[in-house]
Structures are given as structure tokens and as C-alpha cells.
Image (tube, grey):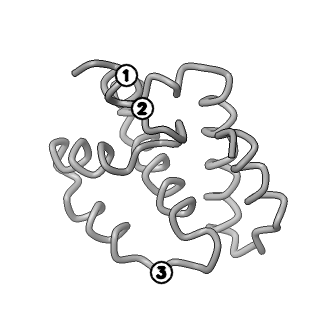
Amino acid sequence: MNKDDTVGESGRLPLRHAYPFLSEKGASDKVSEIKTSERPPGIGSDLKRAKILNLLDENKWLDEFIERYWSIGNTGKGQNQIKRLRRLYDKYLNKEEVEEDDIEESRKIVGK
């Protein structure tokens, strides 16, 4: 696959590649849970990305995923997004309120 084809226009972690990748790895049940999980207003897709990132981290699949599908994950922008998604996931786990800055930061990182 051409690396140019693997990175969405926004440069965000591509769910369209993450779901099949995780299913290939045997995590179909987790993928189904994430796809059907609650979608808080304004952060639904970001929270899904945060959950996907956590699953990739837990299973030590993130490097392989970046290599195959998300080359921007190795750039400064991608690393900033990874940090932001990890913070978002931590806030979700701790039932902390997600602030507008968390969302705005997301848009800055991906150039929106």
C-alpha cells in the first residue's frame, strides 16, 4: 500500500484502517465494543480514537500500525496527537470532564 494512501487528509489516526487491523490481530470483540460505545457530544470520534490507541498500546501493536497505516504517527504532529489521545483516554477513565481546550487542541494538531 502506498503510504500516501494510508494517511487521511486530516492526518488523524485512521479508524478506517484501525478497525480491520485490530480485527486481523484477533481483537474483533474489542473493536465491536468501541464502535458501539457511547459517543459523548463533541468528542465521539476522538474518544473512539483514544480507545483504539489504548488497545494498540496495550498489545504493543502501535509501531506496526504506524508503519503500515499511519506514517504521520512518526512525525511531530502525530506524536502530539498520540499524547493528546492518551490524555483524553485518561480523562475518560477517571471520569474527568473534557474541556473545550482538549477539542481545540485536536483541531490545531491536525491543521483544521
Q: CA distance from mark 3 to mark 1?
A: 32 Å
Q: Residue at x 70, y 50 (%)?
A: 106
Pick the residue in front: 94 or 35. Answer: 35
Q: Give the amino acid type for the residue marked by disc 3 in the picture.
A: Glu
- The percent coordinates of residue 73 (x first, y second) are 52, 27
Q: Disc 2 marks which residue? A: 7
Q: Disc 3 marks which residue? A: 38
Q: Give the amino acid type for the residue marked by disc 1 in the picture.
A: Asp
Quadrant for residue 8, please give it.
top left
Regarding mark 3 in the picture, which secondary structure is present there?
loop
Pick the residue in front: 57 or 22. Answer: 22
Regarding mark 2 in the picture, which secondary structure is present there?
loop
Category of crowding for the residue at label 1, using alpha-carbon neighbours closer than 10 angstroms: few (below 14), some (14–19), many (at least 20)? few
Numbered-mark total: 3
Image: 81 above or below 101: above
Look at the numbered discs 1 and 2 and tell me whether their residues touch, using CB distance below 8 Å.
yes
Q: Residue at x 75, y 69 (%)?
A: 98
Q: CA distance from mark 1 to mark 2?
A: 6 Å
Quadrant for residue 74, please give it.
top right
Q: Residue at x 64, y 40 (%)?
A: 110
Look at the numbered discs 3 and 1 and tell me whether their residues touch, using CB distance below 8 Å.
no
Quadrant for the N terminus in the image:
top left
Nearest-to-viewer mark from 3 and 1:
1
Q: Is residue 22 left or right of residue 36?
A: left
Category of crowding for the residue at label 3, using alpha-carbon neighbours closer than 10 angstroms: few (below 14), some (14–19), many (at least 20)? few
Regarding mark 1 in the picture, which secondary structure is present there?
helix
Q: Earlier in the sequence, mark 3 or mark 1?
A: 1
Image: 84 above or below 33: above
Quadrant for residue 18, please give it.
top left
Q: Disc 1 marks which residue? A: 4
Q: Earlier in the sequence, mark 2 or mark 3?
A: 2
Q: Is residue 27 left or right of residue 54?
A: left
